[in-house]
Image (cartoon, coloured by chain):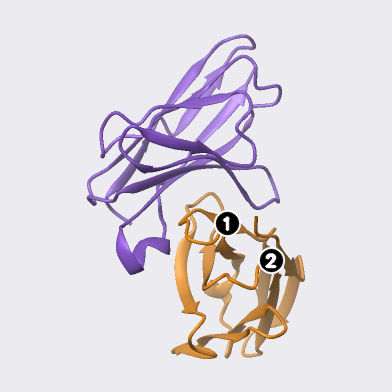
Amino acid sequence: GENVEQHPSTLSVQEGDSAVIKCTYSDSASNYFPWYKQELGKRPQLIIDIRSNVGEKKDQRIAVTLNKTAKHFSLHITETQPEDSAVYFCAAPMDTGRRALTFGSGTRLQVQP
Amino acid sequence: DGGITQSPKYLFRKEGQNVTLSCEQNLNHDAMYWYRQDPGQGLRLIYYSQIVNDFQKGDIAEGYSVSREKKESFPLTVTSAQKNPTAFYLCASSPAGLAGNEQFFGPGTRLTVL
């Protein structure tokens, strides 16, 4: 099965700065990499995802990059705002061909005003 | 956010009791999942079901049971065999096909053992 490691566990940035969270995965056959945002006491919500046939995907201030050779993918948030403060989780398919996901341990992002 | 509901929002259980958490979706999704989240930690998969009348164990299935008699419903029973059940439980679902990896989460049930 897949193993996903996420770093850092906590990240504090000043408002307007950029934030980067990195995940590594073990299964070279993995082909789908989502990022979820979870606010305190709320459900995780998908913010961006990438499939293995592309190297980068952007959505306004959020981008995800994928390096298949090194088996890592990263979340980039530019011009951070206080409402970006939350826990962010990366994930990858648990097994090839299955839809169940293995999640990283999460990164608590704090954006200081 | 809509389409997946979980009940109750908060649940208190005495030691030795079985409790059942409800999860319902009206998104016509084939697959459904149960995750457990402990404070400050990630999501761990308990059980998942890719089709009605079929389900598979996840990483931490011991002490839990599920059923999938209807496409819309995937209840989770926390049995007395689960040694440390206090946690936040999240249900999710995903559609079929190429979009099937994207999971949509319910609002969660917070279970506390007294």
Residue at image point 70% right, 60% down: A3
- Identify which residue is drawn at 60% across, 26% down: B112
Amino acid type at image mark 2: Thr
Q: Are the residues flagged by discs 1 and 2 from a single subunit?
A: yes
Q: In 3D space, how far apart are the residues under numbered discs 1 and 2 (Cα atoms)?
A: 20 Å
- Residue A24's place in the image compared with B65, above or below, is below
> Where residue B17 sits in the image (x, y, percent)?
56, 10
Q: Residue beneath label 1, please?
A: A94
Above/below status of B95 relative to A112: above
Residue A89 location, quadrant? bottom right
Return the x and y of residue B11 as percentages of the image width and height: 50, 25
Quadrant occupied by the C terminus of chain A: bottom right
Query: Is residue B43 shown left or right of residue B93?
Result: right
Viewer-side label of 1, 2: 1
Chain A shade in the render? orange
Say which label, 1 or 2, has the lower sequence index. Answer: 1
Q: What colour denotes chain B?
A: purple
The residue wearing badge 2 is: A107
For disc 1, the chain is: A
* Relative side of B9 to A33, left or right: left
In this rendering, position of residue B22 left or right of residue A4: left
Is residue A113 visible in the rendered image? The answer is no
Left or right side of B76 for B37: right
Instruction: Please provide percent x and percent y for residue B68.
Output: 34, 31
Q: Residue at x 70, y 58 (%)?
A: A105
Q: Residue A93, how many percent across, how many down?
A: 54, 61
Quadrant of residue A6 within the rendered picture: bottom right
Tell me the element at label 1.
loop
Write the residue at 57% across / 70% down: A30
Three-letter amino acid code at disc 1? Met
Compare residues B71 and A76 and report the one nearer the observer.
Answer: B71
Q: Which image quarter is the N terminus of chain A in?
A: bottom right
